[in-house]
Amino acid sequence: MKTARRMEAIKPSATIAMNVKAKELKAEGKDVLSFAVGEPDFPTPDNVVEAAKRAMDAGETKYTAASGSNELKAAICEATQRDLGLSYEPANVLVSNGAKHSLMNVAEVIFDEGDEVVMFSPYWVTYPVQAEFVGAKPVVIETSGEDDFQPDLEQVRAAVTDRTVAILLNSPCNPTGAVYAPETIEGIAQIAVENDLTIVSDEIYKHIIYDDAQHVSPAQVSDEARAQTLIVDGVAKTYAMTGWRIGWIVGDAAFIKRAGALQGQATSNPNSIAQAATIEALGGPQESVAEMTAQFELRRNFVMERLAEIPGVTCATPRGAFYAFPNVAEHYGRELAGRKIGGSLDMAEYLLDKALISLVPGEAFGAEDYIRISFATSMEELDEGLKRLKAALA
Ligand SMILES: *Cc1c(COP(=O)(O)O)cnc(C)c1O
């Protein structure tokens, strides 16, 4: 069957291949431990589940406005006011089927063929793919664990050309856990304003933050920066609601109107029951968020202690999200269990085959020297998994 040329941008992901292999080994009865998952291991809070049940019983089972119900948009405005101190109207909000869908809406509405989009590596796998799918060109600025994965502003400035239309930010970052310093966010916002660029700020991990790290949104930097910022967020990570599929964009009303028109033709409204549950998640008690974050922080500390004991492995301390992103490149070139470890994919395959631990090769995030370990798993599993990692690299 004929396939459109734009499908060339959609490559089967290394992550999925690893997952398939891990499942095969599990099916063979092997005790595989997975540190590859990108979702909280906690259940969705009870009050949210109850709100969904009530919505079904009350007959909230029909179409809502294609861009999301007014009640939910109002709840998102209130949450944005509470979290960032910024006031928006429902006309500034588009609710979509998860934050990934929100980001795809941004790509489709903003990027033309040949437009350049500045982004930082290690990047979330989806960013370059979405840009390429609509014909835009990802311009990738590398960050390194040695600098805590903080972007260099001079490099950002140098990357901007007359084709650049947007800068894509993700702080706290998946896969590195980096939280960009306030000065960095301010600097990037300033560059965007000077060059009339849209700032796409993926803030899906903004509530999962450790130590004294502080989340700053580019929309908070100045009125000018705010006018050019599209904040992307959702319930998936903050409220352990990955399966409910609700995300949103907050920003310029004219953009929101266009993106809403696109969504009206593509998917119509996101699930009405999940929308009702999201109103409760955002407006109800927030204790579960703090509890979950406290658990993640304990695990983060544990993972960092254990990684520090493994020779040839260095890891920048994650200040947010729930991933550690250690550099394992010192082990590249070694021959382990009869195979030469050439890079992150070989390393991940070796660790899966020999240590029965599955994690994501850095290659998937444009960062060959690293592997990603999710700590959205129990302490017991982390304990056993890190023992296995240490033994496998000895
Ligand atoms: C999980 C994740 C998202 C998207 O989440 P949805 O499940 O689509 O709401 C977006 N950005 C990053 C960096 C993520 O890790």
Image (cartoon, grey):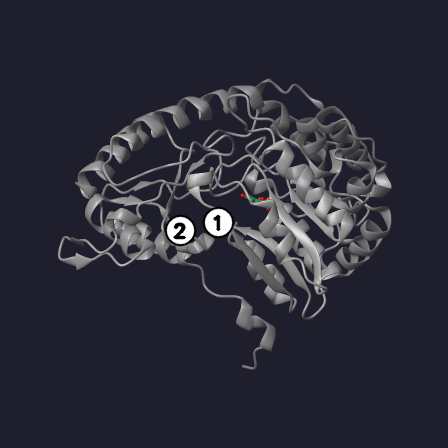
Q: Which residue is mark 2?
A: 362
Query: Horizontal and vertical percent for residue 62?
Result: 77, 45
Q: Position of residue 65 (x, y in %)?
A: 82, 47
Q: Is residue 191 left or right of residue 71?
A: left
Residue 252: x %, y % from top left: 82, 46
Tell me the quarter of the image containing the C terminus: top left
Crowding at dot 2, Cα within 10 Å, few <14 / some 14-19 / many 20+, comes out as many
Identify the residue shown where x is 52% and y is 31%: 320
Q: CA distance from mark 1 to mark 2?
A: 8 Å
| Residue 163 seen by the camera | yes
Residue 162 occupies which quadrant of the picture? Answer: bottom right
> What amino acid does circle 2 point to?
Gly
Q: Are marks 1 and 2 in contact (CB under 8 Å)?
A: yes
Identified at 47% across, 37% down, the residue is: 148
Q: How many marks overall?
A: 2
The answer to which of 46 and 371 lies nearer the viewer is: 371
Residue that numbered label 1 is attached to? 122
